[in-house]
Amino acid sequence: MLIRIIDRYSQRMSRAWTPGLFEVVVLLLFGAVTNVLSAWVFVNEGVVEVPRDPPIDDRMRAWWREHAPPGYDQEPRSALVEEGVGFRRRYLFSEGVFNEVAVRTKQAVRTKQAVLAKGGWPLLSMRCELWRSWTLAGGGMVDLPPADRAAVRIPATHLPFATETQWVLPLAPIWIGFIVNSVTHASLLWVVYLVPVALKRHVRRRRGRCAACGYPVGDSATCSECGAEVGLKKLPIS
Ligand SMILES: [Zn+2]
């Protein structure tokens, strides 16, 4: 049964350039998978364009109050945004001077820090939250245990092209981005899939075979094996 279905679709596939329902479902599944995987790569390995330190506004304060784990009850007093293709990390700090300059000059500041990390291309589609209590001078955690939300950490030492020893994988979907990205990736996969199909058809046609099924076609306009139109190789002179 399953083999018959697959066989029918592979027959159809070699004839049609547009995907049927079965292919659409499979492509969307693959699209969703590549969406998540690429979001994880971008979040951890994305190239940061110029970081910004925007002023703290009411929205950021409200977000902090709403999300802060026990012990993180200060207000955010400075922010830093790192972004680039496929990702954005917004840092909020409980200390006012904790901006990009402070990070570079390693000022001895203790701070509570919240990171809202998002990844995905073309839209941001996965997110997570990381809460930390730490000091730049010591480089280590202080005061409070860290809290990860919707995030998994994995050692990345054996991942190809990983520059960090540990990757943070955001697990919470941002639905609009998730859907748009899955459809986009599925479309790209379809284009990639069509290239070998087009090559196969081209080779068959050059060898005088039916482009759809590979059966030798001689001079007839339709394939005697599968009924596909093969097109005349020589136009009749009139
Ligand atoms: Zn044929």
Image (cartoon, helix red, strand yellow):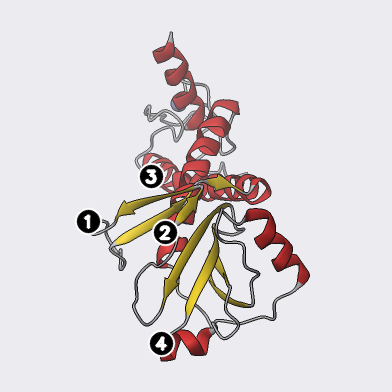
Mark 3 to mark 1 CA distance (whole Å) = 45 Å
Specify which label sits upstream in the sequence, 2 or 1. 2
Query: Disc 4 marks which residue?
Result: 106
List x then y, in percent, for residue 176: 68, 48
List x then y, in percent, for residue 29: 51, 36
Query: Disc 2 marks which residue?
Result: 41
Q: Secondary structure at mark 3?
A: helix
Amino acid under disc 4 = Lys
Mark 2 to mark 1 CA distance (whole Å) = 14 Å
Mark 3 to mark 4 CA distance (whole Å) = 67 Å
State which image quarter holds ligand 1: top left
Query: Disc 3 marks which residue?
Result: 206
| Relative to 157, residue 185 above or below | above
Specify which label sits upstream in the sequence, 1 or 4. 4
Mark 2 to mark 3 CA distance (whole Å) = 42 Å
Amino acid under disc 2 = Val
Amino acid under disc 1 = His
Amino acid under disc 3 = Arg
Mark 1 to mark 4 CA distance (whole Å) = 30 Å
Q: Nearer the viewer, mark 2 or mark 4?
A: 4
Q: Which image quarter: residue 1? A: top left
List x then y, in percent, for residue 3: 39, 14
Q: Is residue 212 left or right of residue 214?
A: right
Q: Residue at x 51, y 26 (%)?
A: 12
Specify which label sits upstream in the sequence, 2 or 3. 2
Q: Secondary structure at mark 4?
A: loop
Q: Which image quarter: residue 122? A: bottom right
Q: Secondary structure at mark 1?
A: loop
